[in-house]
Amino acid sequence: MIKEIIDIIPSKDLRKFLNEHPINLSPLQQATIVSEFANKEEKISVFRKLKKLTENKEEQELFSKAISEIEKFGYFDRNTLEFYKKNFSKGGLPPFSPFLEVCYVPILFKKGDVISYNGEFFYVEDIPNICEVCDFSDECYLCYSLSKKVENKEDLFVAHKHIHVCVAQTVSLESLSKEQKENKERMETLLS
C-alpha cells in the first residue's frame, strides 16, 4: 500500500494501525480509498502512481480514463464508468462502479465500543461482516448517536448511523457527558 494512501485515510487510529501493520491492496483497492477520501489533486497524483505500478493493461487504461475525467470535470464520468463495466464487470455482481472495491480495511472497534465521528460520539452496535460486504461503502459500523435520547427501539432507529471504518476515531469514555453515559447505558439495556 502506498504511504500517501495511508495518509489520506481520515481516521488517525487506522492510519497508525496501517503504518504499524501494513496490508497489501491491489491497485484498484488503493484507488478506492483515494476516490473516497482524497481531493482532486491527490487523486490525480496517486492514480498516476497506481497506473505505473499495475501491469494490467485494462487497469492502466481505467486509470488513464479516470485521470482524464478528474482533470476535466473533477470527478469520474461516463467514459470511466463504461470502460469499467465493459472490462471489470463480474456478471452483474458488485461493485457496479469503478473504485468501489472491497478493501477489507482492518476493523479496529468492537460491539459496545464508543467512537467519534465529526465531533459526535457513537455507540457501536455492529461491525462489518466481511462475508456480506458487497463494496467499499458497506465497510461500516452500525452505530447509535449518544447525543440523541433513546428510550425505546424506535428511538434507536432514529439515532442510528453507518460510520465507515476509515473515519471512526477512538474516544475516551471520560469525554462523554452525563447524558451521553446515560444514553449508552439505555442502549446497552435495549440491545441486550
Image (tube, grey):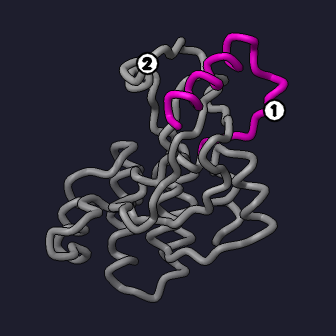
Q: Mark 1 highlights which residue?
A: 172
Q: Secondary structure at mark 1?
A: loop
Does 169 sit left or right of 36 as displayed?
Answer: right
Q: Which mark is residue 8?
A: none
Residue at image point 79% right, 29% down = 173
Q: Which numbered disc flags the more N-terminal residue, 1 or 2? A: 2
Q: Is residue 61 magenta?
A: no
The quadrant the N terminus occupies is bottom right
Question: Which mark lies nearer to you, 1 or 2?
Answer: 2
Residue 122, horizontal then vertical, whole percent:
60, 30
Using the image as rendered, state which of residue 163 and residue 91 is in the foreground.
163
Q: Secondary structure at mark 2?
A: loop
Does 188 sit left or right of 97 as displayed?
Answer: right
Residue at image point 67% right, 41% down = 113
Q: Amino acid at mark 1?
A: Ser
Does 128 sit left or right of 124 as displayed?
Answer: left
Residue 38, horizontal then vertical, whole percent:
55, 47
Using the image as rendered, state which of residue 143 and residue 186 is in the foreground.
186
Residue at image point 42% right, 18% down = 155
Seen in the picture, residue 107 relative to 162 is either above or below; the reply is below
Magenta segment: 167-192
Q: Which mark is residue 152?
A: 2
